Image (cartoon, coloured by chain):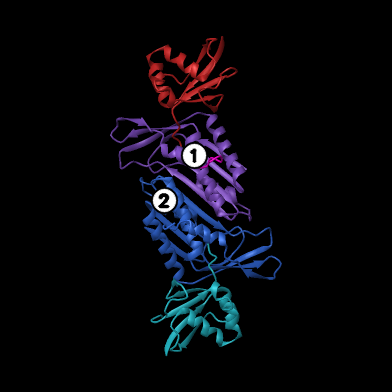
Chain colours: A blue, B purple, C red, D cyan
Amino acid sequence: MATVRVQTEPFDVAAEVQALVSGRTDIGAVVTFTGLCRDEGGTLSALELEHYPGMAETEIIRVAAEAQQRWPLNGITAIHRYGKIMPGDAIVLVITASAHRTAAFEAAEFLMDYLKTRAPFWKKEHHADGSEGDWVEAKDADDAAAGRWREDM
Amino acid sequence: MATVRVQTEPFDVAAEVQALVSGRTDIGAVVTFTGLCRDEGGTLSALELEHYPGMAETEIIRVAAEAQQRWPLNGITAIHRYGKIMPGDAIVLVITASAHRTAAFEAAEFLMDYLKTRAPFWKKEHHADGSEGDWVEAKDADDAAAGRWREDM
Amino acid sequence: MTELNLRYFAWVRERIGTAHESIELPGDIATVADLLGWLKTRGPEYEHAFEQTDVIRTAIDQTHVPHETPIAGAHEVAFFPPMTGG
Amino acid sequence: MTELNLRYFAWVRERIGTAHESIELPGDIATVADLLGWLKTRGPEYEHAFEQTDVIRTAIDQTHVPHETPIAGAHEVAFFPPMTGG
């Protein structure tokens, strides 16, 4: 019961939520997370997202399956875009639905933490002044965020 | 920078998100929480939500202000409905926007935990078999969830 | 004697049979707890509503307060069960 | 000699100057670490891409693996920097 897509096109959060909850009366909580491209105080003109086709979908499906094992969920949607993304535009969407709010919140956070550290996507910055930008560096904070879900800890 | 409403009418999550993020390029993360009426395995035909007019808005505004002091947020929207709510329909909406995902997630959870324990709303169940339902009892789990945000702990 | 507006919500309201009333407050009532004790003497419906005072939540002028709070200067006191919104 | 498909992403791809290539794998290469060591001998662009092998992430047939993993039976090995999606 997970919908996973990797695409260049923008996504419609409302339509994705609707697809998940429509006609159901057993869902008590829906959490959505949308990750957006920031312009970093006007210095960034776009992000270029590269991905590993095939593996990207596989890793997200794996993370979604793990979330469904850990929490009692009615459904999961995870969509990750690639290609050129402008400031203010959405990059990633995660939706979780559950009978109870704690499961929905925790599963959404888990999905985002794991997406960031396991799904093969890389961001390159394009500078507003036209100069070539750098590849965004992975953050230790993201590894730490993913680490807190380790069950052996 | 908080939008707080207490109303009988349904709300439009997409429109509320749009109102919060439109034209901005400093937001990196938007979390929405929607609380829905469950039919409890078909036994519940509706929930009747009673509230304390005036105090309900005041308490939600207070909780939103506290969230804004604790986390670096770009904006908060909190909408709570009252009156008769059918299974599958939305009761409450919380939206948080921030540069970073952790702040947005934590603030949304905080808002929901505090809404549940501080905002003067009460739910009465209407049974599907036509018999008079009971008032929903407050859960110790909700007090515990709110308690974890105490800064003196 | 001071006039005080009382409001009741949810099952407190149902048991008492009214959503609000104005009362003349006897002079020897200092705190919320005193007021609850006095209200319980006003009839079986009040006794039923307030039989377990420890579960009753109180707001003075729309702010949550504990039962030991003085009610001097209050315009409106509300009694209700623990909240179940969200 | 076995044919192996190699894929490179992000700055690993940029430094090497190609996104994928097919190589004939020398027989004495057993693990991912061996493969990285051998690739570094193929020219300055490879040396630059793999100068810090501890930051290089690897996938064998689209599954993350540590550097000590044997590559026998692999069809596709990918090298890339730590992921920065989400």
Quarter of the image with the C terminus of chain A is bottom left
Describe residue A124's horizontal placement relative to residue B11 as left or right. right
**Which amino acid is tagged 2?**
Ala
- On screen, B37 above or below B122? below
State the predominant SS element of the stretch in magenta: loop
Magenta segment? B148-153
* Residue at 45%, 37% in the rendered image: B143
Residue farthest along the left direction in this orientation: B129
- On screen, D46 above or below A28? below
Residue corresponding to mark 1: B147
* Residue at 60%, 83% in the rendered image: D45
Label at residue A96: none
| Image position, residue A67 (x, y; %) | 41, 57
* Residue at 56%, 76% in the rendered image: D12
Residue corresponding to mark 2: A97
The answer to whether residue D65 is visible is yes
| Image position, residue B11 (x, y; %) | 49, 42
| Mark 2 secondary-structure assignment | strand
Dots 1, 2 in contact, CB < 8 A: no
Q: Is residue A132 magenta?
A: no
Quarter of the image with the N terminus of chain A is bottom left
Query: Marks 1/2: CA distance?
Result: 24 Å
> Which picture quadrant has residue D40?
bottom right
| Image position, residue C58 (x, y; %) | 50, 25
Describe residue C85's horizontal placement relative to residue A43 as left or right. left
Which of C41 and A29 lies nearest the eye of the viewer? C41
Residue farthest along the bottom direction in this orientation: D1
